[in-house]
Amino acid sequence: MPSSQLALAVEQIRFARSYTLGLASDVDPADWFRMPGGVTHVAWQLGHLAMAEYRLALERIRGRRPEDDALIDAAFLRRFGPDAPSPDARLYPSAAEIRAVLDRVHEQTLRELPHLSDDALGEPPARPHKIAKNKLASLLWCGQHEMLHAGQIGLLRRLLGLPPQW
């Protein structure tokens, strides 16, 4: 059974993903690449969340593995990294592909995290991070980071003409 700290981190990751998917659920995939306001789009937000969950909850916890390419490949990681989103949808995978990567990474995260030991939580992450100084902090930041981007998806919903969900 995972420690209470690990259980809290996993629950935050689950909650954040559920909240994010709720916000994105009624956004037409045809609108995923629209940039109302000219800053970002839903496709980039969701792709970025897949990349970030992989980096924070898998790669920084246990390192990159060769089989990870089947979850999320290097091109996807680059495309949804810190560079500004592009309005050119041709530069991105399709909405269905983005959603598939988002789901695969999340499912793998939820499979692996329960096996993390309490001792491991205090270890430095496998890759340095400016916010997460240990593995527990990396997992907690994963959920917090997702909520930050969920807020951006919520704003995009309104700019696309969708009603608020609250």
Image (cartoon, rainbow, N blue to C red):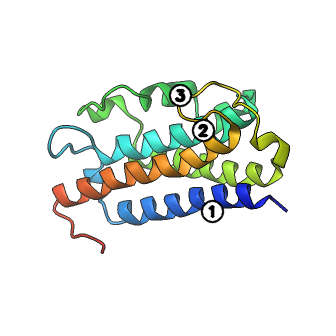
Crowding near the residue tagged with mark 3, few <14, some 14–19, many ≥20 C-alpha atoms within 10 Å: few
Check the image and report above or below for 162 versus 130.
below
Residue 99 visible in this rendered orientation of the protein: no
Q: Quadrant of the N terminus?
A: bottom right
Mark in the foreground, 2 or 3: 3
Check the image and report above or below for 100 versus 69.
below
Residue under the image location 16 percent in, 46 percent down: 36
Q: Which residue is mark 1?
A: 11
Mark in the foreground, 1 or 3: 3
Q: Position of residue 52 (x, y in %)?
A: 52, 39
Give the amino acid type for the residue marked by disc 1 in the picture.
Glu
What separation in Å lies between label 2 and label 3 (alpha carbons)?
Answer: 12 Å
What separation in Å lies between label 2 and label 1 (alpha carbons)?
Answer: 15 Å
- Residue 163 shown left or right of residue 95 in the figure: left
Crowding near the residue tagged with mark 2, few <14, some 14–19, many ≥20 C-alpha atoms within 10 Å: many
Q: Position of residue 6 (x, y in %)?
A: 72, 55
Residue 114 visible in this rendered orientation of the protein: yes
Front-most of residues 4 and 99: 4
Give the amino acid type for the residue marked by disc 2 in the picture.
Leu
Q: Position of residue 114 (x, y in %)?
A: 78, 55
Residue under the image location 56 percent in, 25 percent down: 74
Work out whether mark 1 precedes mark 3 in sequence or the reverse, and give the earlier one. Answer: 1
SS category of the residue bearing label 1: helix
- Residue 119 shown left or right of residue 68 in the figure: right
Q: Which residue is mark 2?
A: 56
Crowding near the residue tagged with mark 1, few <14, some 14–19, many ≥20 C-alpha atoms within 10 Å: some
SS category of the residue bearing label 2: helix
Work out whether mark 2 precedes mark 3 in sequence or the reverse, and give the earlier one. Answer: 2
Q: Which mark is residue 130?
A: 3
- Residue 126 shown left or right of residue 100 in the figure: right
Q: Quadrant of the C terminus?
A: bottom left
Give the amino acid type for the residue marked by disc 3 in the picture.
Lys
